[in-house]
Image (tube, rainbow, N blue to C red):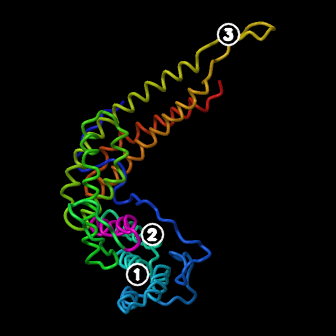
Amino acid sequence: MTRLSASCFVMIGLILFAAPQPLQAADPAALPPFGPFISEGVIPNEQFVSVAEVRQAFDAADYRGALRKASQALALKMTPLSPDERYAVLMLRGESLLRLNERAYSIDAFDAASRAAGRKQIKKAAVAKANAVIIARAQGTLYKPTHGGGVMDAIDIVNPKSRWTAMRAAFDDLTAENLSRITRALENDTLPPMLDLVPALADMYVLESATDQPRQTSQVLKKFGAHARTLMQAEMIRIASRMDVLNDQASSWVGTDTGYGSHLDRRGLHSDERHELADLISYTGRILEAAQRARQLTLSFGFPGENWDPVIADAATLIERGAEILDRRY
């Protein structure tokens, strides 16, 4: 098994590209008059629609008009938007949908804006993602803080100024809710508790990044990255060893008496062993996904990502090995 080196600029799993808990989308048959999220077709005799035109409609509180113009702008083929323009239009789309109380579609728009910003504009990506997170965590258009002492009023998330306050409150709530779990995960020698914390850490990272520098979460993620590599290595060694045992058992010869004589057959996998092997493959898949996303985040910080290549390769090899044992005809 390849030895994996430590890195302090990575974390397990998805950060900017992890989706918040989804809301129930509206019935597709009852889509608002602004049309589907993003049109894939070409507008006949298309006319260029600028970011300024979308913003003008939004500033005039013509949110449905802004959404129609945004759909036109995003569908442009002959004069497509630049990445920065696409980001701006998607942000305006998200804001317009939020004001129309179309929260599920608003989350989709802000998620798309985060992807449009990409790895080269990490701050803008975090801001867009933080908008999606706070909308998903709010009750309607209000976020109710759960920590901080005393009785705290619900915070409006539609107004951008108070939404910033809601993001800070949500970050504080998540920190308070998960601090003990984070401490235990860093002290434990098992990987699952760390993987289970990824969604909360992802939300914490983007909320803190959107309202300040991600100082607290960056420190946590540095520790997580180093600890995760050690645990990933240990887990894959354990999984490889167990797969070898299962393979040896399945490949062993057993005698069978058919009543017409005896003959030798490969034992194959028992039902419980097949379930165990499938679970090992699935678990290794989680490790592979975490390593791939960690590599992606490393690149987004401007650092080389090849340090994650060995763990990605080892996990992929284990998955292939497990599938071969599981699917073999004995």
Q: Which residue is mark 3?
A: 255
Query: At 40% across and 81% down in the image, what residue appears?
Result: 99
Q: Secondary structure at mark 1?
A: helix
Instruction: Report, in whole angstroms, how far the alpha carbon at label 1 lies from the one at label 2.
Output: 14 Å
Q: Which residue is mark 1?
A: 99
Residue type (three-letter) at the residue carrying disc 1: Arg
Query: Which sits in the foreground, 58 or 99?
Result: 99
Query: At 48% across and 34% down in the image, what residue appears?
Result: 280
Which quadrant of the figure has residue 241? top left
Seen from this angle, which residue lies furthest front?
A: 151
Residue 181 located within the stretch drawn in magenta = no
Mark 1 and mark 3 in contact (Cβ < 8 Å)? Answer: no
> Which quadrant: the N terminus?
top left
Name the front one of labels 3 and 1: 1
Percent from the top left, x then y, of residue 198?
35, 50
Percent from the top left, x then y, of residue 21?
43, 59
Name the front one of labels 3 and 2: 2
Residue type (three-letter) at the residue carrying disc 3: Gly
Asked if residue 57 is positioned above or below residue 158 in the image, the reply reads below
Mark 3 and mark 1 lie on one chain; the one further toward the N terminus is 1
> Which quadrant: the C terminus?
top right
| Local crowd size for mark 1, using a 10 Å CA cut-off: few (<14), some (14–19), many (≥20) | some
Mark 1 and mark 2 lie on one chain; the one further toward the N terminus is 1
Query: Which sits in the foreground, 192 or 296?
Result: 192
Q: Specify start and end residues of the magenta stretch as a single range.
A: 121-141
Instruction: Report, in whole angstroms, how far the alpha carbon at label 3 lies from the one at label 2.
Output: 60 Å
Q: Is residue 79 toward the left or the right of residue 143 in the image? A: right
Q: Which residue is mark 2?
A: 108
